[in-house]
Image: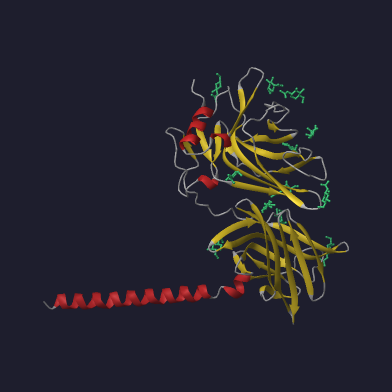
Amino acid sequence: MQHPGGVLLALLLLAGLSLTEAVEVEVHDKDSKTCIYAVLSVNFTILYEGNGTTENATFPLPNSVSSNGSICGGNNSAPLLKMGFGTGHSLSLNFSHSTGEFRGDVLIFTYNTSDAKRFPGAKNKSVKHVAVNSLMDSTPLHTIYTCRSVKAIASEAVVMVFWNVSIQAFVENGTIGKNESFCKADLPTTVAPITTRTTPIVPTPVPTKPPPELPAVGNYTIKNGSDPCLLASMGLQLNITYTENKTHSVNIDSNSTASGQCGDKDATLVLEDMDTTIQFHFIVDQSKFFLKEVKANVSLVINGSRTALNSNNSNLRFWQAFVGSSYMCHKEQSIVVTDQLVINAFNVWVQPFQVKNGTFSRAEDCKTNENYIVPIVVGAVLGAIILIVLVIYIIGRRQNRSGAYE
Ligand SMILES: *[C@@H]1O[C@H](CO)[C@@H](O)[C@H](O)[C@H]1NC(C)=O
Ligand SMILES: *[C@@H]1O[C@H](CO)[C@@H](O)[C@H](O)[C@H]1NC(C)=O
Ligand SMILES: *[C@@H]1O[C@H](CO)[C@@H](O)[C@H](O)[C@H]1NC(C)=O
Ligand SMILES: *[C@@H]1O[C@H](CO)[C@@H](O)[C@H](O)[C@H]1NC(C)=O
Ligand SMILES: *[C@@H]1O[C@H](CO)[C@@H](O)[C@H](O)[C@H]1NC(C)=O
Ligand SMILES: *[C@@H]1O[C@H](CO)[C@@H](O)[C@H](O)[C@H]1NC(C)=O
Ligand SMILES: *[C@@H]1O[C@H](CO)[C@@H](O)[C@H](O)[C@H]1NC(C)=O
Ligand SMILES: *[C@@H]1O[C@H](CO)[C@@H](O)[C@H](O)[C@H]1NC(C)=O
Ligand SMILES: *[C@@H]1O[C@H](CO)[C@@H](O)[C@H](O)[C@H]1NC(C)=O
Ligand SMILES: *[C@@H]1O[C@H](CO)[C@@H](O)[C@H](O)[C@H]1NC(C)=O
Ligand SMILES: *[C@@H]1O[C@H](CO)[C@@H](O)[C@H](O)[C@H]1NC(C)=O
Ligand SMILES: *[C@@H]1O[C@H](CO)[C@@H](O)[C@H](O)[C@H]1NC(C)=O
C-alpha cells in the first residue's frame, strides 16, 4: 500500500524543500488504525527574560516528535494531536466537528524555560503555555486540510510560523482522504476549494489573497454608573498598508471589550481585542455631534516578526447627526486615518450623547443627506433616453415621408 505521507514527503523533496523541516505524525487507535494524521513545519520564536535582558529563543519543531498523550477521540472526548519534544515542550491541537466538517479548535504550545539548551540564561525556569485558535479553517470530513503558504500566529511572547501543513482528524477506517482542501492563502482566486489529488502538484501556487470576510457587527455600550450613556453598533475592518502597496486587512472582533467615558460635549469609545486598540473620540459642535478623532494601536505579524503600528487623526468629521438623535449608515464607509490605516465601517449605528433609557434615539440615516447624487444621475439618464427616443421618432417619420413620395 502506498503511504500518503510518503507521497507528501516525496513531493516536498521534489519541490526542493529540506526533508528535515517537515514533521510527520500519526495517531493510532486501539486497532492500530490511523485516526489523526499530520505533516507540518513550524518555527518558534519565544521572547523570555534573561539576566536583566530580554532574549529570544528560535528553534524549529524537531523532525522527531512523540505523539504520546494524543487521543483519537470518541463519543465524549475530542481528538487531540499532541507533539511532544525535548524536555517538556509540546504543541497540541484538539479538533471538533459538526455538519460534515472538522476543524482545529485550540492550539496550545507548551515550553519549558528550564531547558538550558533552548533557553540559555533564562531567569524564570518554568513551564509556560500559549493558546490560540486560528491554525486551520473548517474542512470537509474525509478530506485532508492542506496549507503550503506560510502562516504566522503570534500570541503574547511567542510567534509560531507554520508552513507546508497537512492535517486530517476523524480519519475513518484508517484511510487518509484522497481529496485535499486548501487553505485560503493557497488558492488562486478562481480555483474551487477542493481538488482531487491526482498528479503531484509541484509548483506552489502563487497565493492571491482573497478579500477578507465582512466583519461581524459588535454591540458596544458605555455606562455612566449603571445608565448606558454611549451606544455603538458596527462592524469594523482595518486596512493596513505596511510597506508600499502591501496591505493587510484585520477584522475587529465583535467581542472586543468596550470602555470609555461620556461627557456633555466629549465622549470616547475604546475597543480592545487581542492585538488592537482603537479609540473613537466624539465631540459636540453647536447642535451636532460627530467623530473627530481616531487613535489606533495595532500589533501585527509581518513575515514572522511582530510590528506595532500607531495611527492618529484628530481632524476627522464623520458620523454627524443632531445631538439627541443617533447616526445610522448601512453602506460601507472608509475612514482614512493615515496613509497607513483605513477603517472600513459597516452598518454603523452610534449615539455618543444623550442616550435615553439605554436605547438608540431617532436615527439620522446617512442616505437622507448624502445620497442626493443618485436621483440626479437617474434624472439625467431618463432625460437622455427621452431625447434619444424623440430623435429616433423624428428620423423614422422623415424616412416614412420620403418613402411615400417615391
Ligand atoms: C525557519 O527557520 C529556519 C532556520 O532558522 C530558516 O532557515 C527558515 O527560513 C525559517 N522558515 C520560515 C518559513 O520562516
Ligand atoms: C548577570 O549579568 C551580570 C552583568 O552582566 C553579571 O555580573 C552576572 O554574573 C550575570 N549573572 C548570571 C547568573 O549570569
Ligand atoms: C532575536 O534576537 C536577535 C539577537 O539578539 C535579534 O537580532 C532579533 O531581532 C530578535 N528577534 C526577535 C523576533 O525579537
Ligand atoms: C507516555 O506518557 C506516559 C504518562 O504521561 C508515560 O508513562 C509513558 O512512559 C510515555 N511514553 C513514552 C513513549 O514516552
Ligand atoms: C459511541 O456511540 C455509539 C452510538 O451512539 C455507540 O454505538 C458506541 O459504542 C459509542 N462508543 C463508545 C466508545 O462509547
Ligand atoms: C523542564 O526541563 C527541566 C530541565 O531540562 C526538567 O528537569 C523538567 O522535568 C522539565 N519539566 C517538564 C514538565 O517536563
Ligand atoms: C480543546 O481544548 C481547549 C483547551 O484545553 C478546551 O477549552 C476546548 O473545549 C477543547 N475543544 C474541544 C472540542 O474539546
Ligand atoms: C469505512 O468503512 C465502512 C464499512 O466498511 C464503509 O461503509 C465506509 O464508507 C468507509 N468509510 C470511508 C471514508 O472509507
Ligand atoms: C447586536 O444587537 C442587535 C440588535 O439588538 C442584534 O440583532 C445582534 O445580534 C447583536 N450582535 C451581537 C454581536 O451581539
Ligand atoms: C485597502 O486599501 C488599499 C489602498 O488604500 C486598497 O487598494 C484596498 O482595496 C483596500 N482593501 C480593502 C479590503 O478595503
Ligand atoms: C463572542 O462571544 C460569544 C460568547 O462568549 C461566543 O459565542 C461567540 O462565538 C464569540 N464571537 C466571536 C466572533 O468570537
Ligand atoms: C424607559 O423604559 C421603561 C421600561 O422599559 C419604560 O417604562 C419607560 O416608559 C421608558 N421611558 C422612556 C422615556 O422611553
In the displayed structure, does residue 78 sit left or right of residue 212? right
Picture quadrant of residue 114? top right
Picture quadrant of residue 338? bottom right
Residue at the right extreme of this rendering: 225
Examine the rendering and report whether any part of residue 380 can be seen: yes
Q: Residue at x 71, y 35 (%)?
A: 90
Q: Position of residue 127 (x, y in %)?
A: 79, 39
In the displayed structure, does residue 140 sit left or right of residue 16? right
Q: Residue at x 44, y 34 (%)?
A: 200
Q: Position of residue 406 (x, y in %)?
A: 11, 76
Q: Nearer the viewer, residue 4 or 65?
A: 65
Does 389 appear above or below 59? below
Q: Residue at x 50, y 36 (%)?
A: 12
Q: Position of residue 278 (x, y in %)?
A: 72, 63
Examine the rendering and report whether any part of residue 157 can be seen: no
Q: Nearer the viewer, residue 196 or 325?
A: 196
Does 381 appear above or below 24? below
Colouring style: secondary structure
Disc tally is 0
In the displayed structure, does residue 304 sit left or right of residue 401? right
